[in-house]
Amino acid sequence: MSVISSWNLTISLNTTLSLSWRSSLPSRAIFPRPKKPKTLVVLAIALGAKPTVLVSEKLGDAGIQLLKTFANVDCSYNLSPEELCTKISLCDALIVRSGTKVTREVFESAMGRLKVVGRAGVGIDNVDISAATEHGCLVVNAPTANTIAAAEHGIALLTAVSRNVAQADASVKAGKWERNKYVGVSLVGKTLAVMGFGKVGSEVARRAKGLGMQVIAHDPYAPADRARAIGVELVSFEEALTTADFISLHMPLTPATSKMFNDEAFSRVKKGVRIINVARGGVIDEEALLRALDSGIVAQAALDVFTEEPPPQENKLVRHENMTVTPHLGASTTEAQEGVALEIAEAVVGALKGELAATAVNAPMVPAEVLLELSPYVALTEKLGRLAVQLVAGGSGVKFVKVTYASARGPDDLDTRLLRAMVTKGLIEPISSVFVNLVNADFIGKQRGLRLTEERIVLDGSPEKPLEFIQVRIANVESKFASAISNSGEITVEGRVKDGKPHLTKVGSFGVDVSLEGSIVLCRQSDQPGIIGKVGNILSEENVNVNFMSVGRIAPGKQAVMTIGLDEEPSRDALKKIGEITAVEEFVFLKL
């Protein structure tokens, strides 16, 4: 077994969450207090009201129509920051392009209602991801629909600067005929450095190879095998600068890439290099680029993006004779606009429905096919967390939690980040007023000091299923249900997925088998005839339906633990009657 990860949490249990009773203690039932809804939107959606989606920038009609099938859509363009903050408290989702700044003030103004921000495009530097995460707001983007359009625009600018297309066009329209002035350079045999070898960068590389160029790339995160498959060599930043005839930028804007192309970088490039940027404006120090153009270090540049958009009219860089500029047209094709609109609308609607988002940027990034496979295990881990924390006796503090995954798959073939987040959700939500989701689970866990460790048990057998079972253990606590304490001295619950549904298969050292639906009653009793019938009669008289029942025992005639799955919550009287059955030594009622 190997520890995968750990971090610190302390949860104070100052609220009683489940009814418990032991024969050795006074027969006093403690009932859970009703929990207030986290936000108005949760209550509204539960009652059937449509969520509201605010679209703050122009979106393709196909996306708008898809949104309208599920939500009320408010298309309000050109909102000032103050207007956005005022309107956002009435919205469950917000869709933006690159022009709207979704700041911390926006998330604070939402007062917990905003559940998802959709960025219609790839770059998310206009969204405060940290603030979104702290407020439990999912951020999704549309990373694939405009890939080809952006790559094609990059190639268009590449060819334009090689043959002075923009300058020659302006010259002819001014009544001139300056053939000798606008002699260009050939692309065949020239070296193109692709800076950022993601989706767009790799598509640019493919097309440049087709033009007869030698292509190199710099990206510290790109896999070498993917580059080799295209015929591209991955090189260092220094080598890219010093050997390239053309440089095409395709990296995101991050603290590490901000003004990456500055005076120092331009001092190391090959004299006469040509630069194309269809990524983010801030990766180039525009004043440094202007100096490099004036000195002739950079022969020409083509920019589709700028630090400030639109750039000021007096911007000297834009007006430079060796500049070709376009107004952020990278994704501006009819096909791309409709594709982005549909992609972001689908992501936002899915997120509002509670589905796991493959394009989430502030939650565990897991491919769609993996999400589909792990989905029932996500439900299992949350419910195991809920059960485990409700078994902790009041006054104890949950500090140390261990999650064990048993699988026949190799260590690199199982991504447990989603599962860890859902265990945290299950542990924290029942004992606090905090709303925990896949976005903020790690943040809230760290904030509260929990030390959660994960370990893997590698099993022999077929790896068809991602997991055989999942076990959650809480150490250094007392339990309301003594039988939940395993031989290791920890509260232990274990479960597995059967027929696509989560099942509880172990409590403490007792094997059980009950579907994790509705509510559960755990009873420890002397193993003797008639107990199941007595409990069943009490619940039947209360019109409480039993959906599942399982009994695990140490040995015939010894102690046994009966696990009962219920569709409805029993009354106080019904639970009291169960506790008064002579053979019942202790029991606990748990809500899922």
Image (tube, rainbow, N blue to C red):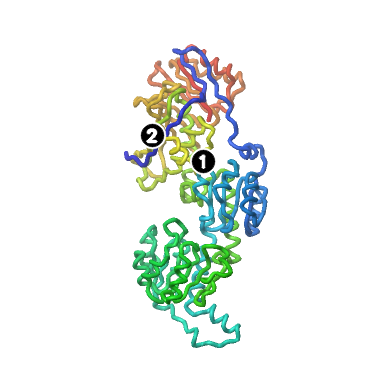
Q: Residue furthest front?
A: 314
Disc with the residue nearer the chain's start (2 vs 1): 2
Q: Is residue 161 visible?
A: yes
Labels 2 and 1 touching (C-beta < 8 A): no
Q: Position of residue 66 (x, y in %)?
A: 64, 53
Q: Which mark is residue 437?
A: 1
Q: Picture quarter containing residue 256?
A: bottom left
Nearer to the camera, 242 or 337: 242
**Which residue does the image show at 45% across and 21% down from the upper left?**
480
Q: Position of residue 314 (x, y in %)?
A: 57, 70
Q: Is residue 288 left or right of residue 546?
A: left
For disc 2, the neighbor class at 10 Å (few under 14, some 14 to 19, many from 20) is some
Q: Where is mark 2, residue-wise?
A: 402
Question: The residue tagged with tag 1: helix, strand or loop?
Answer: loop
Nearer to the camera, 184 or 187: 184
For disc 1, the neighbor class at 10 Å (few under 14, some 14 to 19, many from 20) is many
